[in-house]
Image (spheres, helix red, strand yellow):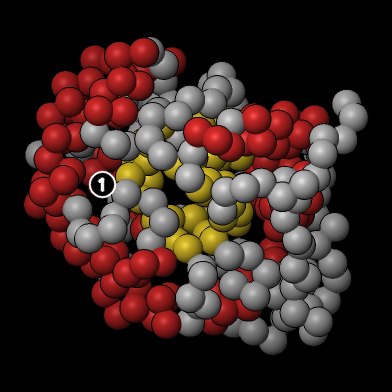
Amino acid sequence: MPEIESAPLAVPLYIGTMGWNYADWSGVFYPTRVPLRESLPIYAQTFDAVEIDSTFYGTPRQTQVQKWYQTTPVSFRFCPKVPRLLTHDMGLRDVEVPLAEYLRVMSSLKEKCGAILFQMPPSFTRNELSALETLLPKLGGLQQEGQRFAMEFRHRSLITSDVSELLRSHNVALASADYFGMPRRFELTTDFVYLRLIGKHGSFENHKETQIPKQEHLQRWAEVLRNNQSHYERAYIFCNNDYEGYSPATCNRLKTLLGQSVRNAPSEVQGTLF
């Protein structure tokens, strides 16, 4: 497949990894002497966005969120995941109180909050659509200033025009995903793109280097983003370690395809991104 043009897009692109705190990256992406709990400022020297995976497991302390804000550049963007308690355990039913508290805590990200992701489980099917129909009209009263939302579904019964229209009517992004077992699709339901390159979980024993390149897939996604850039105002794009084996490298290859400059990891880091 030939390389696509690499001229920069006319819209802001925020490209990063899903999480930043990985032991396998020590000595490869991060200096070995840097504790992983202190790695975010180093990460932010290379990428300008990250999807916060840790919030999927519970609402963090507000002091922790404030530290994330304080230790990253003004142009940096965070996209936190809604806790699985709300999406997986409660299935979006009667979640208003814990969701409001979560959004209050995440408001400490201020202008650095890009979009907040609802990652729905495969068990959330069309049979549970009423829960989504009930929650979406309430988001406006729960969200803090500037907060936006994206929704990812992992069951094919929700790949329908009425579900897309439901999200569109409430200004929520339908997250596009390259995920094992689900069709790849790109559909805009609001003014921004949320794209997740996930792969198949557990594909690799370690995440120190690219192991299965997916250049053709990356080029296709880049083409879709380029061809549709007049229809959205910005894009958040996140790569998982399970996609090619080492998400920093995936991010940099995609940035190159989209005409973005690649920033090297700090010079004291051992090894390279590729």
Q: Quadrant of the C terminus?
A: bottom right
Q: Is residue 244 visible?
A: yes
Q: Residue 154: image x %, image y %?
A: 43, 26
155 or 201, nearer to the observer: 155
Q: Residue 208: image x %, image y %?
A: 76, 59
What's the residue at 84%, 67% (across, down)? 272
What's the residue at 65%, 30% (across, down)? 227
Q: Residue 164: image x %, image y %?
A: 35, 21
Q: Is residue 93 visible?
A: no
Seen in the picture, residue 159 relative to 28 is either above or below; the reply is: above
Residue 149: name its quadrant: top left
What's the residue at 36%, 67% (across, down)? 111
Query: Number of marks in the image?
Result: 1
237 or 214, nearer to the observer: 237
Residue 55: name its quadrant: bottom left
Crowd band around label 1 with a 10 angstrom C-alpha radius: few (<14), some (14–19), many (20+): some
Q: Which residue is mark 1?
A: 85
Seen in the picture, residue 230 relative to 20 is either above or below; the reply is: above
Q: Using residue 21 as the reference point, say whether residue 192 is left or right of it.
A: left
Amino acid beneath label 1: Leu
Seen in the picture, residue 189 relative to 261 is either above or below; the reply is: above
Label 1 secondary element: helix
What's the residue at 41%, 66% (across, down)? 112
